[in-house]
Image: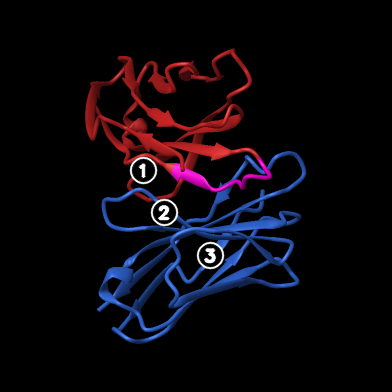
Chain colours: A red, B blue
Amino acid sequence: AQTVTQSQPEMSVQEAETVTLSCTYDTSESNYYLFWYKQPPSRQMILVIRQEAYKQQNATENRFSVNFQKAAKSFSLKISDSQLGDTAMYFCAFMNLPPSGSRLTFGEGTQLTVNP
Amino acid sequence: AAGVIQSPRHLIKEKRETATLKCYPIPRHDTVYWYQQGPGQDPQFLISFYEKMQSDKGSIPDRFSAQQFSDYHSELNMSSLELGDSALYFCASSSAEGTNEKLFFGSGTQLSVL
């Protein structure tokens, strides 16, 4: 079974600064997807960024980018120019490729607070 | 754009009662997933359906059952409710065209068992 670990329960950053959230995972599969989801106080689950394991290039989405280290099974999220609206719980998640199923396995989450 | 619709948004039940949660996926999405998120916890996968058939099963209690109907909406039925069932229940949907990796989540149903 896959496991996802986020070792930082809480983090804080000043507005406009950069912050990196860590995630490690364990799997015996070679092809899979990795995700970062954001859950603000509204508790809506919002996809931030997605990485396909077979792609060596790190995914980027505007101010969000990842550092994907497949051999180390590490998948960190970098948020640049942090904004107050980035305050949320961030979950790292793993998904196998079909036909193994497409359930998401989540990490424990990192509560990020952006301070003015 | 249409999103995943869950109803009700909030539900309050007594112990040992039953509850039914409904999920309406995005049009043309054929796969539905249910997740349970307890207070301060990460979401846990319960069950999923593809084309009205159960496709995967996670940590769903035997007291819970679910199905996907011909119009692709899904219902999660929960019986003999316990205090520990109090949680946010998410539904998500995706399309099997491609690799199903794009999950879209609903806003969730907050279930409180008193």
Q: Is residue A77 above or below residue B103?
A: above
Instruction: Give the residue at x 23% y 28%.
Output: A11
Q: Is residue B53 magenta?
A: no
Residue indicated by mark 2: B44
Residue indicated by mark 1: A40
**Which contiguous range is marked in magenta?**
A98-105
For this rendering, which residue is in front, B99 or A12? Answer: B99
Residue A14 spot, x, y in % from top left: 24, 20
Q: In terms of secondary structure, where does tag 3 sit?
A: strand
Parent chain of label 3? B
Parent chain of label 1? A
Q: Report how far apart the C-alphas of labels 1 and 2 lie in the structure.
A: 18 Å
Residue B83 spot, x, y in % from top left: 26, 74
* Quarter occupied by residue B71: bottom right
Residue B6 numbered mark, or none: 3
Residue A73 spot, x, y in % from top left: 44, 22
